[in-house]
Image (cartoon, rainbow, N blue to C red):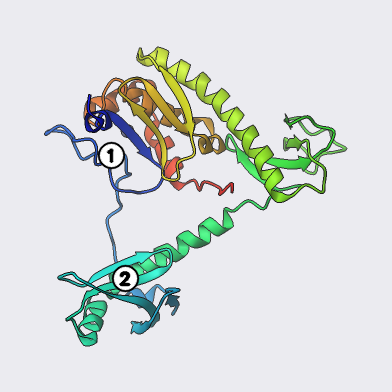
Amino acid sequence: MSRRAAALDTQQLLLFEAPAPLAVKPPAVAPPIAHTEPVAPITEPVSIASVLAPAVFRHPLADREIRLHEHVVAYALKRARRRSIGFIVGIEGLSVNAPKWVGLHDIEAALHEKSRWILKKLQEQQERAQRMQSARVDWRDGTTIPFLGETVIVLLDARATGAVLNTDAPSGSTAALSGVPRHTLHVGLPHSAAPEQIRDAVQSWLQRQARRVFEERCAHFAQQLKVRVTKLSLSSAQTRWGSASADGSIRLNWRLIHFAMPSIDYVVAHELAHLRHMDHSPRFWDVVRSVLPDYEQARGSLKDGLVPLLD
Ligand SMILES: [Zn+2]
């Protein structure tokens, strides 16, 4: 089998909204590949200026500046051998690629014409950067991490071996809030430990838990779906939750372990269902539904949940 043919046998579940995998051609009658979530209809305001406080968007390599509605947009202009003006909005800001023969006046006219799209994308990127920043874990004694949908407090405890999870119910004297279970992860490191050491210890604990939970859930759904998983591996892909190959190998993102079980079950069932149907046809979703009638809810919470940056 050629490498290309092999690629056609792989299905991937994407982490964020992203283009559908190119590798798989949907059958003629099937709806579009749905690894991406349905995109909400774009309901643009009449004037984006009415919903955005005046802002400054500045690309680090900006060499031009323009005022679009109330907003100052500093962009990087690149001259390229191309036929049309191209706009790219990335995490850094706006860059514009224009043919050498197009004058600045025409470039600015094009920017004004596309201003609503540009401002909307700049705003989205800014929000995304802020969310990523707030999800960044501060690796120190007492930091908290999400684990199976619950909050776990990381405690440095040189007496502990490796990392040990305590899920004791509060015993009055030690509980900060009575009735609220206190989950603590005792990490066998001194208080002088560097943030990287804490991160590595907690990550390897999380990955061990991920393997344990995923193996159990794979066995459960493999039996229900009558499929055989030949290999289960953990991934740390930035953009996808899991993938399945026709040879029965399954890859699951270990960061799923932050989410509650229904979300984990959805990804496991989704990938295992691909061992029955290597597409996103109605037949495929029927298989998913047969083991998880409420899968759409779990799919939604995965999409809304923010994956903490653990590095
Ligand atoms: Zn899929």
Choose between 97 and 117: the one closer to the eye: 97
Mark 2 belongs to which amino acid?
Answer: Ile
Asked whether residue 63 appears in the rendered view, the answer is yes
Mark 1 belongs to which amino acid?
Answer: Ala
Task: Name the residue that disc number 1 marks.
Answer: 34
Residue at image position (46%, 16%) is 220
Left or right: where does residue 54 sit relative to residue 162? left
Determine whether the beta carbon of the residue marked 1 sits less than 8 angstroms from the nearest atom of ligand 1.
Answer: yes
Up-down relation of residue 221 to residue 142 (above or below): above
Up-down relation of residue 79 to residue 26 (above or below): below
Residue at image position (37%, 23%) is 272
**Spot occupied by residue 263 in the image (x, y as percentages of width and height):** 47, 34
Residue at image position (72%, 42%) is 153
Left or right: where does residue 86 sit relative to residue 83? right
Left or right: where does residue 204 sit relative to residue 48? right
Quarter residue 74 falls in? bottom left
Task: Name the residue that disc number 2 marks.
Answer: 118
**Spot occupied by residue 295 in the image (x, y as percentages of width and height):** 39, 31
**Spot occupied by residue 126 in the image (x, y as percentages of width and height):** 45, 66
Label 2 neighbourhood size at 10 Å, few (<14), some (14-19), many (20+)? many
**Which quarter holds ligand 1?**
top left
Residue at image position (18%, 69%) is 82
Up-down relation of residue 59 to residue 311 (above or below): below
